[in-house]
Image (cartoon, grey):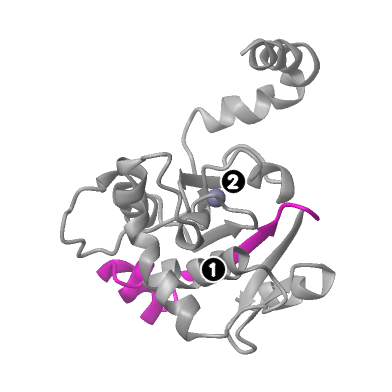
């Protein structure tokens, strides 16, 4: 907590002057163009690796960057669903990014039989990643040079995009080409970001060359 407080004081002393005009404009309203769904993991830092500014991203973070399907039989996870609805139907974002990452703790339980720590609420939430595990077992659509939990993490990104398509108004806007869905994967060790290429069925590094690909979307 001391580090957090010191960070606030540092921000006030060193950076606030640069941001003051930006925030006074943002106080009038937000117009983000992207809904960014990422894992809670403290090492995943979208504003840093995407060099984004305040007001650019409408961010949803949860364990495992999961999206409950629209017709969830329990209807018990309204927080993520509400954020999706608000950003798409009210803020009219044009893009949705599902961003997974390497060494994701939400993927490891699928490969471990750790009964020492009981986390029933987390286990219940992770049921939304189970279809990704079936995808992992049945498909070879991501890099096989990765460790199993990292392959699963990439499969999970693809699976959560499928869950987004179950929302009727996203399905409709996809049909009308008013919205685009993107699967990204952040490699913690290198701080590189990869995007899922639907043609090659693989994750590809985002660099200067891919800028042209995204420009056509
Ligand atoms: Zn994670």
Residue in front for this viewpoint, 198 or 105: 105
Is 99 positioned to the left or the right of 216 in the image?
A: left
Q: Quadrant of the N terminus?
A: top right
Q: Residue at x 40, y 62 (%)?
A: 129
Q: Is residue 207 above or below residue 6?
A: below
Which label belongs to residue 200? none
Can you tell which quarter of the image residue 172 is in? Answer: bottom left
Percent coordinates x, y for residue 76 in the rendering: 20, 48
Q: Residue furthest right?
A: 208
Residue placed under numbered mark 1 in the picture: 152
Residue in front for this viewpoint, 8 or 155: 155
Q: Is residue 159 above or below residue 124?
A: below
Percent coordinates x, y for residue 170 in the rendering: 34, 68
The residue stretch that appears in magenta: 163-190
Q: Residue at x 40, y 50 (%)?
A: 91
Is 121 positioned to the left or the right of 46 in the image?
A: left
Residue placed under numbered mark 2 in the picture: 56
């Amino acid at each position: 907590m001391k580090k957090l407080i010191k960070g606030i004081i540092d921000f006030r002393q060193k950076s606030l002057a640069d941001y003051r005009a930006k925030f006074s404009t943002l106080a009038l309203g937000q117009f983000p163009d992207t809904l960014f769904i990422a894992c809670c993991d403290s090492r995943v830092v979208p504003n840093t690796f995407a060099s984004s500014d305040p007001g650019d991203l409408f961010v949803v973070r949860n364990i495992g960057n999961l999206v409950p399907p629209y017709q969830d039989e329990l209807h018990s996870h309204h927080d993520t669903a509400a954020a999706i609805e608000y950003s798409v139907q009210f803020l009219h974002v044009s893009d949705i990014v599902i961003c997974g990452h390497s060494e994701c703790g939400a993927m490891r339980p699928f490969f471990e039989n750790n009964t020492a720590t009981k986390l029933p609420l987390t286990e219940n939430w992770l049921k939304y990643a189970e279809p990704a595990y079936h995808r992992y077992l049945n498909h070879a659509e991501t890099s096989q040079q990765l460790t199993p939990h990292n392959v699963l993490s990439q499969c999970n990104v693809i699976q959560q995009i499928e869950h987004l398509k179950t929302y009727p108004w996203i399905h409709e806007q996809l049909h009308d080409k008013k919205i685009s869905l993107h699967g990204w994967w952040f490699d913690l060790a290198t701080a590189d970001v990869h995007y899922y290429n639907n043609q090659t069925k693989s994750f590809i590094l985002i660099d200067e060359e891919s800028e042209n690909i995204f420009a056509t979307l």
